[in-house]
Amino acid sequence: MRYRHHQQPSRQTEMTQQTLAMAQDQGFERFRRPTRRDEFLATMNRIVPWAALCAVVEPFYPKRGNGRPPIGLERMLRIHFLQHWFNLADFACEEALYDSASLRSFAGIDLGRETVPDATTLLKFRRLLEQHHLAEQMFAEVGRVLQDSGITLKTGTIVDATLIAAPSSTKNADKERDPEMHQTRKGKQWYFGMKLHIGVDSQSGLTHSAVVTAANVHDKHPLPQLLHGAERRVYGDSAYMSQHNLIRSKAPNAKDFTNDRTRRPDQEVDDVKRRKNRNKSKIRARVEHVFAVVKRLWGFTKVRYRGLAKNATRAFTALALANIYLSRGHLMAQVRP
């Protein structure tokens, strides 16, 4: 097809006239309305405890010296959180900030005066968090802030674990899979990667403890680390069945409310146990809300880095942000004028 080049100037003139008219009226994008992304970022901007989280990182953050001054800490933290919320690698986050006005506005970047921090800067900030285990500290700080806001831990804990996949291919520079990841069998299928174990408050549905292990570690082994010690009840699926001693080693007053197997040795179904399991599962289902946010909403279904430590940093940050997101109704009620 041949284009008619003689018609192009008139189209450019028309576009120029529209732009001038918009500028003279109420500004550009008169008919733009807030998107769900805009509304989400506006909510997070109001309820994330920026000052408290910056205070965790500030002692380790580079100070102004003779060289190039560092980028503001809160800005770097905002960009770091954007990476988690929208599942962005370092370079992809840099590109997204150049592309999206809403992301730049959230991060406080004005392209008329400054550039977007490059991927290397984002990488160095993440490594700073990894080196000093700051993601775990931010997770704990979010828990403290939520408790100060009136959300307290009750006497029940739900424990569960989920698999996070890792690349099983050996077509890489090292010609081998990640040595810290392992494979495990679930049902009739094999998985390679790591496990994220969490302890969730049975009333609020918020995560209060977490452990990251290789995928071949049985769910029961990190169980004591997932309890805060004051539990009266502990819920879990059948993977935690008959772990009374492990539970009482950390929570001596807790009763075991984990699910039991419903099939007898003769393969008959025990209807009484099945009804009990169904009642327990109504409470235990709250742990799935956390996994839904971290894995489905924010895309943490696969590891992005090699090694457990790097992915643990991502996991603890995602869980801290998930607690804020799941508490948004309560937090927004407190910040409204």
Image (tube, rainbow, N blue to C red):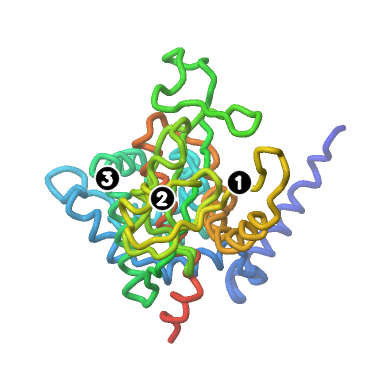
| For marks 1 and 3 on the same chain, the one whose residue lies earlier in the sequence | 3
Q: Position of residue 300 (x, y in %)?
A: 52, 44
Q: CA distance from mark 2 to mark 3?
A: 32 Å
Residue at image mark 2: 244
Disc 3 is placed on an element classified as: loop
Residue at image mark 1: 261
Disc 1 is placed on an element classified as: loop
Which amino acid type corresponds to the residue marked 1 in the rendered image?
A: Arg
Quarter holding the C terminus is: bottom left
Q: Residue furthest right?
A: 1
Q: Name the side, left or right, on which 173 lies relative to 123.
A: right
Residue neighbourhood size for the residue with mark 2, other residues' Cα within 10 Å, grouped as few (<14), some (14–19), many (≥20): some
Q: Position of residue 77 (x, y in %)?
A: 35, 54
Disc 2 is placed on an element classified as: helix
Identify which residue is drawn at 37% across, 72% down.
152
Q: Residue furthest left?
A: 66
Disc assigned to residue 133: 3
Q: Which of the 4 image quarters holds residue 272?
A: bottom right
Which mark's residue is nearer the viewer, 2 or 3?
2
Q: Name the side, left or right, on which 40 lies relative to 143.
A: right
Q: Name the side, left or right, on which 329 lies relative to 2.
A: left
Identify which residue is drawn at 30% across, 39% down.
127
Which amino acid type corresponds to the residue marked 2 in the rendered image?
A: His
Q: Are marks 1 and 2 in contact (CB under 8 Å)?
A: no
Quarter holding the N terminus is: top right
Q: Position of residue 330 (x, y in %)?
A: 47, 76
| For marks 1 and 2 on the same chain, the one whose residue lies earlier in the sequence | 2
Which mark's residue is nearer the viewer, 1 or 3?
1
Residue neighbourhood size for the residue with mark 1, other residues' Cα within 10 Å, grouped as few (<14), some (14–19), many (≥20): some
